[in-house]
Image (cartoon, rainbow, N blue to C red):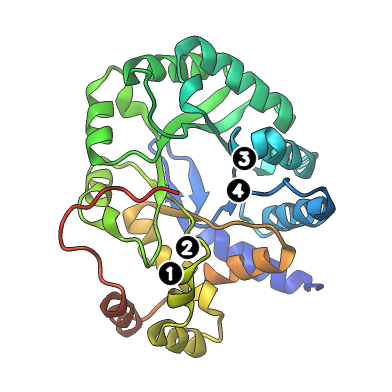
Amino acid sequence: MKWTEQQLDTLRKEAEVRRVTLADGTELPVIGQGTWHIGDDPFTRSTEVSAIRLGIRLGIKLIDTAEMYGEGRSESLIGEAIKGMREHVFLVSKAYPNHATRRKLVHACDESLKRLGTDHLDLYLLHWRGATPLAETVSGMEDLKKAGKIRHWGVSNFDTQDMQELWSVPGGTNCAVNQVLYHLGSRGIEVDLLPWMRAHHVPMMAYCPLAEGGSLKAQLLHDPAVLKAANHHQATPLQILLAWSIRHAESDGIISIPKAAQPQHVFQNAQAAAIRLTEEEQDALNHAFPRPTQKIPLDIV
């Protein structure tokens, strides 16, 4: 499908308007490009490369990957996609927990940089907690910053208690973001984690904002409140789910990173940034999929 330059420019301007700001003043779009499972199939490689490049043209400059994704295949594909466009990209990757020691982080980061074809990451995350003490991981991250290999560091899949512990170790407050699962059907973080992060000015990066496949996703996509909002905004149900995830993006510091494997999906993701759900629509969605009334364990996929 071909899009006019006017359409691309309109969506690019929308991406530039809606921003989340990191502690050092770095501004990021409220929608990024997720790449889990991208790069796994050589027959779809060219399409996936085109999708990532289109996203960058649309102002969706944040690209999220991990050494775990395809054991480096995702990073390699992204390296190909961003050639000649690196200065327009905010590049995020993640380290395995068993690479979280001060020494192993250096090697893991170097390998990611090689696959991505760049000399630095804009953000480097600990994918989830492992056996390495947080103080050692933080020291390793700070070493990488001093060496110029990363600009920021953060964490992923950290619950409230994890964040509190992180804040207690030297340098822990330099954590730039926490990346966690968040979508309309998984709202547990709203009870205490999201308020804690908001109070401590830590942006949240929402992965799987459209939910994973299965019965829950089907339930979300066919819910009357979702369908009614989609009809009102002349959008797809998936766009409504994405718009919901960033409904308070600027005030709560939320960046949503849906998978971006096909150009058409990337274009639709960019359109979702322009959808502003009405209070009535938000109330209907809250009624259909209410947040928990008490603390529950952090959802992880």
For marks 4 and 3, give the CA distance: 6 Å
Q: Nearer the viewer, mark 3 or mark 1?
A: 1
Tell me whether circle 4 and circle 3 mark residues in contact (CB < 8 Å): yes
Is any atom of residue 243 visible in this view?
A: no
Is residue 131 rendered to the left or right of residue 34?
Answer: left
Whichever of callouts 4 and 3 sits on the residue coming sooner in the sequence is: 4
SS of the residue at dot 2? loop
Q: Which amino acid does label 1 sit on?
A: Leu
Q: Which residue bears the numbered disc 4?
A: 36
The label number, if any, that marks residue 75 in the structure image: none
Q: Which residue is at the far top? A: 103
Callout 4 crowding tier (Cα within 10 Å): few <14, some 14–19, many ≥20:
many
Q: What residue type is labelled 3?
A: Tyr
Is any atom of residue 134 visible in this view?
A: yes
Viewer-proximal residue, 80 or 100?
Answer: 100
The label number, if any, that marks residue 69 in the structure image: 3
Tell me whether circle 2 and circle 1 mark residues in contact (CB < 8 Å): yes
Report x, y in % for residue 262.
72, 62
Q: Which residue bears the numbered disc 2?
A: 211
Callout 2 crowding tier (Cα within 10 Å): few <14, some 14–19, many ≥20:
many
The residue drawn where x is 60% and y is 41% is: 65
Callout 1 crowding tier (Cα within 10 Å): few <14, some 14–19, many ≥20:
few
Q: Which residue bears the numbered disc 1?
A: 216
For marks 4 and 1, give the CA distance: 19 Å
Is residue 265 rendered to the left or right of residue 31?
Answer: right
Q: Which residue is at the far left? A: 294
